[in-house]
Amino acid sequence: MNVDSIRDGIVIDHIAAGCGMKLYRLLGLESLEAPVAMITNVVSRKLGRKDIIKVDAAIDVDLDIIGYVDPGATVNIIRNGELIEKKRIEMPEKLVNVLFCKNPRCISSCEQELDQVFHLTDREKKEYRCAYCETKASNL
Amino acid sequence: MKRSIIDVPDLSPEELDRLMDTAEDIIAHPDDYADACRRKKLATLFFEPSTRTRLSFEAAMYELGGNVLSVTGAGTSSAAKGESVADTAKTVSCYADIIAMRHPKEGAALVAARNASVPVINAGDGGHCHPTQTLADLLTIRREKGRLGNLTVGLCGDLKFGRTVHSLINAMSRYEGLNFVLISPEELKVPSYVKNDALKKKNIPYVQTTDLEEVIGDLDILYMTRVQRERFFNEEDYLRLRDSYILTPEKMKKARADLCVMHPLPRVNEISVAVDDDPRACYFKQVLNGKYMRMALILMLLKEAGTL
């Protein structure tokens, strides 16, 4: 399968197989007018299988979202057909308006103007908790 | 600098010790504190029913020589008109020097604290935190047992939804030589994240049981709790679990002579009224200790904010 190389844009590589669509949705890529390639289940020496997203536009992506979905992913910035930067991804300490608290007793469930804030509480378990009520985030 | 108290970990172990020292000094020398907060105002914003906590805060402020502004019930405040917690906190900051707030929604106190320009004390945010209850519990244990370490602490009743229990386990887990005995029905056991964070990670021994009578003789502290109707979505579950444990004079016969029986109150029927006359019943002393700890906390926060 061939996907054309991009000239100005980003390539999110080494996404764990199966996480690509989640990332696509959370990054809001469906609303872009630019070409976006979503490639799933690509054979990878490192991962066995991986997903790749290619965006043919010089957009900013929220690295926190990528770090939340898969801290092992890499983000390559392409300009004039050249790789100019490889961004390191980390699991973010704090997520704002990415996850939504499911606890009906939480203040964020009834006061709509509040940001939905989650803090990383266990890096090993990849566990985030609501900043207001400390309810554990459920997987997206 | 303005600081708010949302949960017990907002206070360092040293600050907790200092608060208890101040509370003991207030008990010993009440006259020395009678004008400590003269011309200062505490706003008590209680959007959820409470007798004890609100009166305790208000009595605390009066005994410090201060004044109280009070809102009780969401129906009588601007919250009924749809005002946000953030706006309420900003508005009340214009009138009061310090706020004590109870709200049915978890996290409401944090929102208030972020928006108020004066210190906010969380007086209970739904089933989440109730730090001043824990302060009352710690002072009671220290006064009754003379120490906060080397104790076997039994917690009995609703250990799943009981916020005071989680908070007490967390607060006590920093002391040496503790053993916890967790007594509850299967459905109301301590959540695993509380056990993991406060007990397992710190290698604090604990046992879980459903049988109070089997373990009551081993305990230095017995902390009873109420199965709270308001924490259940399902009335049937509440009714089924409500009467799981009732402490009676007969059960007290199996307990040590120096057991300290505590309860955050209000009780429904989980401690028989006949136990009240037992010298080991400490729950009304606990209420009084709560007032002294709230006095100490108000003093500390007003001093830190530069108001005193």
Image (cartoon, coloured by chain):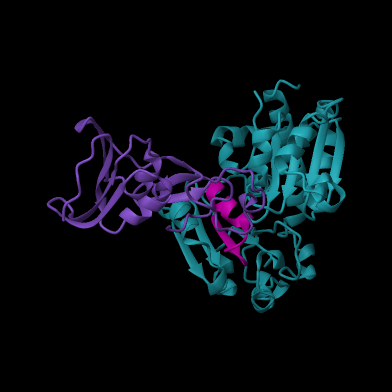
Q: Is residue A17 magenta?
A: no
> Residue B215: horizontal and vertical position, in percent?
55, 69
Q: Quadrant of the C terminus of chain B?
A: top right
Q: Quadrant of the N terminus of chain B?
A: top right
Which picture quadrant has residue B217? Answer: bottom right
Q: Colour of chain A?
A: purple
Q: Is residue B166 magenta?
A: yes
Judged left or right of residue A126, residue B7 is right
Q: Residue farthest to the left?
A: A45
* Segment colored magenta: B152-171
Viewer-nearest residue: A26 or B217: A26
Q: Is residue B28 visible?
A: no
Viewer-nearest residue: B270 or B160: B160
Task: Check the image and report above or below for B128 versus A9.
Answer: below
> Residue B194: horizontal and vertical position, in percent?
50, 56
Viewer-nearest residue: A57 or B123: A57
Task: Check the image and report above or below for A113 versus B75.
Answer: above
Task: Check the image and report above or below for A3 versus B235.
Answer: above
> Residue B113: horizontal and vertical position, in percent?
66, 36
Judged left or right of residue B175, residue A110 is right
Viewer-nearest residue: A55 or B95: A55
Q: Colour of chain B?
A: cyan
Q: Is residue A36 visible?
A: yes
> How many numbered discs sit on the rendered protein?
0
> Residue A24: horizontal and vertical position, in percent?
36, 51
**Residue appearing at x 63%, y 47% in the figure:** B107
